[in-house]
Image (cartoon, helix red, strand yellow):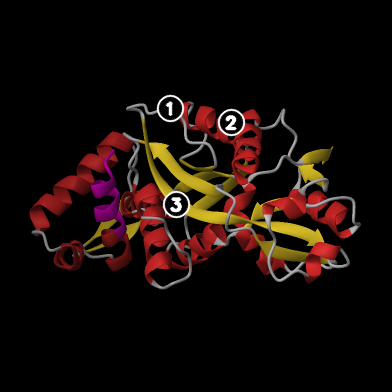
Amino acid sequence: MELQQLRYFVAVAETEHVARAAERLHISQSPLSRQIRQLEDHLGLQLFERIKQRVRLTPAGRDFLEQARDLLGRAERIEERARQIGKGEACSLSLGYCDGVVHNGSLPAALRRFRTTYPRVSVKLAAMRSGEQVEALERSLIDIAFLYNLPKPRESLTSRLLTSEPFVLAVADDHPLAARSAIAPSDLDGEPWIALPKSINPAARERFLAACEASGFMPDIQFEVPHISTTLGLVSAGLGVSIMQASMQRMSPPGVVFKNVDWLPLVVEIHLVWRTHAQTAGIRHFLRALEACHENGEIALSA
């Protein structure tokens, strides 16, 4: 049994006239009659009663009409869904991300534009460390990764630098440094520091210490906390100073003042990574959403 036969059957059932059904279907009457007979033979039951020039559904035909309409409706929905998926209008997209891409507004801006343009796409988000995201990409658990630490070059992955921003110094609003118009490296000698645990990102800790040493001082790390919100709370309480990406200033946390440390040779880089041979419509459209956000000044993409 073919869907075309069901469409022929429904047309004849609704018009109760083979000639009129043939006209609606834009075919001749003879092949239409033949298709109806073949359908009845295939099912082993009589669908129509022939009364002169008209046809009427039998009780079995009325029941079959209901089922045929339901099946054709589902077939149309499946076909439309397939078209939407092919256009990237209806599919799923899984994104892994680091906190920084949320804080600087890049991910929220891109998601806002993407959801507006493609509201039928199912978007899944997963907060992960950089290494976890790379593994998830390789296992096809996520489609796009927003991460700090770029993996070693490999043909299976494509990447681009999404954003790069400097660090700023966070101090309590009643700290003596808060009133300074400028902060020098020597001002930080002897200050207690709050930093990300070394166990979470050893490479980042090494880069931080090297940048401090190159600037002429070494931080006295007294507290290690894994979350930026906790760091800000400890800074506000006067337990130490810390550095964080410059876009954190947008949050205006109470009790915290941010100071420029342009002399610190350290930046926060966020990289966009995806599987090289997995250029699905959803991925392409999301990348375009990022570019559109950049063109409209919503985010600042790195060259």
Nearer to the camera, 106 or 198:
198
Residue at image coords 37%, 69%: 295
Identity, as a three-letter code, of the amino acid under mark 1: Lys
Decide which of tag 1 and tag 2 comes sooner along the chain: 2
Instruction: Indicate which label's residue lies in the foreground, 1 or 2.
Output: 1
Identity, as a three-letter code, of the amino acid under mark 2: Glu
SS for dot 1: loop
Decide which of tag 3 and tag 1 comes sooner along the chain: 1
Decide which of tag 3 and tag 2 comes sooner along the chain: 2
Is residue 40 left or right of 220 when viewed as pictured?
Answer: left
Find residue 257 and report its horizontal and vertical position in percent. 77, 66
- Residue 152, disc: 1
Rounded to the nearest angstrom, the CA distance separating label 1 from label 2 is 14 Å
Q: In which quarter of the image is the N terminus?
A: top left
Residue annotated with mark 3: 162
Residue at image coords 41%, 61%: 289
Residue 173 in sight from this viewpoint: yes
- Residue 187, disc: none
Rounded to the nearest angstrom, the CA distance separating label 3 from label 2 is 19 Å
The reply to whether discs 1 and 2 touch (Cβ–Cβ < 8 Å) is: no
Label 2 crowd bin: few (<14), some (14–19), many (20+), radius 10 Å: few
Nearer to the camera, 41 or 266:
266
SS for dot 2: helix
Q: Quadrant of residue 84?
A: bottom left
* Residue range corresponding to the magenta coloring: 1-10
Residue annotated with mark 2: 132
Rounded to the nearest angstrom, the CA distance separating label 3 from label 1 is 17 Å
Vertical side of 269 occupied by 27: above or below: below
Q: In which quarter of the image is the C terminus?
A: bottom left
Residue at image coords 85%, 66%: 255
Is residue 39 left or right of 160 when viewed as pictured?
Answer: left
Nearer to the camera, 246 or 84:
246
